[in-house]
């Protein structure tokens, strides 16, 4: 991946909040409607041809961010530009055309595959919706992608329940790539699989990236998985990106105490960088995030100002940004 490649995706100031209404009984006792800020003022770019890994603990907002990027969920605020176009300015038809170029691979292939459809029907559905192909062309395009992801032509009349987890993820990948997209959000695509199968699927995604000139946003809670495929990595905590850097640099020279703690807890990565104590406790609830730096309740290096002042992203090296007061990131 060229370091000077132009951005294919640009996200600026993206916010996604959900309204959480109390039950009727709770309302009778005066419980208020609350707002959950799943994604809070996130900005980043993904360059054409690169893989940006997005890492963070479960519930930190990374999957919501991935869905907002594809407008599968509407952002509350902020902009998403794809190939130079602000997606919010597109009408229904233009957005539909743009969506052909932006696809998603889901975490749970079984839940995302219609159990009553055969593999051929599942994989060909996007082609039938978006492209006008003859019956023969449809069959050929479907067969080509099914075989390319490692399934046998004889398996195309089978149903999802007749496949293993790894094979089902191959079906999900074939469906995502059937329209030959430019950009794919991979949302925890291997986290439901055994480690040996994970390696095969990651290798397949790597091959397909090269072959189809794909750009990935690769979401995972597993730093080892993200590290295998990513050019750069963004680290997310409680709805915010706290560090973003070149993959090797982030792994060898993590700056944010949260990234350092994630690395300290990751069993399969090079640990030559600075060390920190393992993460203690659970992240605070997004319903009641702490003021100041959201990580201060778990940070071994927290200072008084961390409790009241939110740090802003600071450039600590070329292509390396950190949101932490240790590096002067005052709001
Ligand atoms: Fe820790 Fe303070 Fe940095 Fe937050 S801003 S990560 S609490 S040192």
Image (spheres, rainbow, N blue to C red):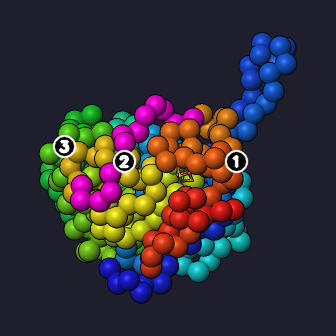
Q: Is mark 1 on a helix, strand or loop?
A: loop
Q: Which mark is residue 308?
A: 1
Q: What stretch is highlighted in magenta?
A: 271-284
Q: Main secondary structure of the magenta part?
A: loop
Q: What is the CA distance from the residue labelled 1 to the residue labelled 3?
A: 42 Å
Report if residue 236 lies within the magenta region: no
Quadrant of image for the C terminus: bottom right
Residue 36 appearing in the image: yes
To which quarter of the image does residue 113 belong? top left
Q: Position of residue 157 (x, y in %)?
A: 24, 45
Q: Which mark is residue 51?
A: none
Quadrant of image for the N terminus: bottom left
The mark nearer the N terminus, 1 or 3, is 3
Tell me if mark 1 has few (under 14), some (14-19) or many (20+) residues whose alpha carbon lies within 10 angstroms of its own. Answer: some
Above or below, 198 against 233 in this view is above
Q: Is mark 3 on a helix, strand or loop?
A: helix
User: Residue at label 3?
Assistant: 195
């Amino acid at each position: 991946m060229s370091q000077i490649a132009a951005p294919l995706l640009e996200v600026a100031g993206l916010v996604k909040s959900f309204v959480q209404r109390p039950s009727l009984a709770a309302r009778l006792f005066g419980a208020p409607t609350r707002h959950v800020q799943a994604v809070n003022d996130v900005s980043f770019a993904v360059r054409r041809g690169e893989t940006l890994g997005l890492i963070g603990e479960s519930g930190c907002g990374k999957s919501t961010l991935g869905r907002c990027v594809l407008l599968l969920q509407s952002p509350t605020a902020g902009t998403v530009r794809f190939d130079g176009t602000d997606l919010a300015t597109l009408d229904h038809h233009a957005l539909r055309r743009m969506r052909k170029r932006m696809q998603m691979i889901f975490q749970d292939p079984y839940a995302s595959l219609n159990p009553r459809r055969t593999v051929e029907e599942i994989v060909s559905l996007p082609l039938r919706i978006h492209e006008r192909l003859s019956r023969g062309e449809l069959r050929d395009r479907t067969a080509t992608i099914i075989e390319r992801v490692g399934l046998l032509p004889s398996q195309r009349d089978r149903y999802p329940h007749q496949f293993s987890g790894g094979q089902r993820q191959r079906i999900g990948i074939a469906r995502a790539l059937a329209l030959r997209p430019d950009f794919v959000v991979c949302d925890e695509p291997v986290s439901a699989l055994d480690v040996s199968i994970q390696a095969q699927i990651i290798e397949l995604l790597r091959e397909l990236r090269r072959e189809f000139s794909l750009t990935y946003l690769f979401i995972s809670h597993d730093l080892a998985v993200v590290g295998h495929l990513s050019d750069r990595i963004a680290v997310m905590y409680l709805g915010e990106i706290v560090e973003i850097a070149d993959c090797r640099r982030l792994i060898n020279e993590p700056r944010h105490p949260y990234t350092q703690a994630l690395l300290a807890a990751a069993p399969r990565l090079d640990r030559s960088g600075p060390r920190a104590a393992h993460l203690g406790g659970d992240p605070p609830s997004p319903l009641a995030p702490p003021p100041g730096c959201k990580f201060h309740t778990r940070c071994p290096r927290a200072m008084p100002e961390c409790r009241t002042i939110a740090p802003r992203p600071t450039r600590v090296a070329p292509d390396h940004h950190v949101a932490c007061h240790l590096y002067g990131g005052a709001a």
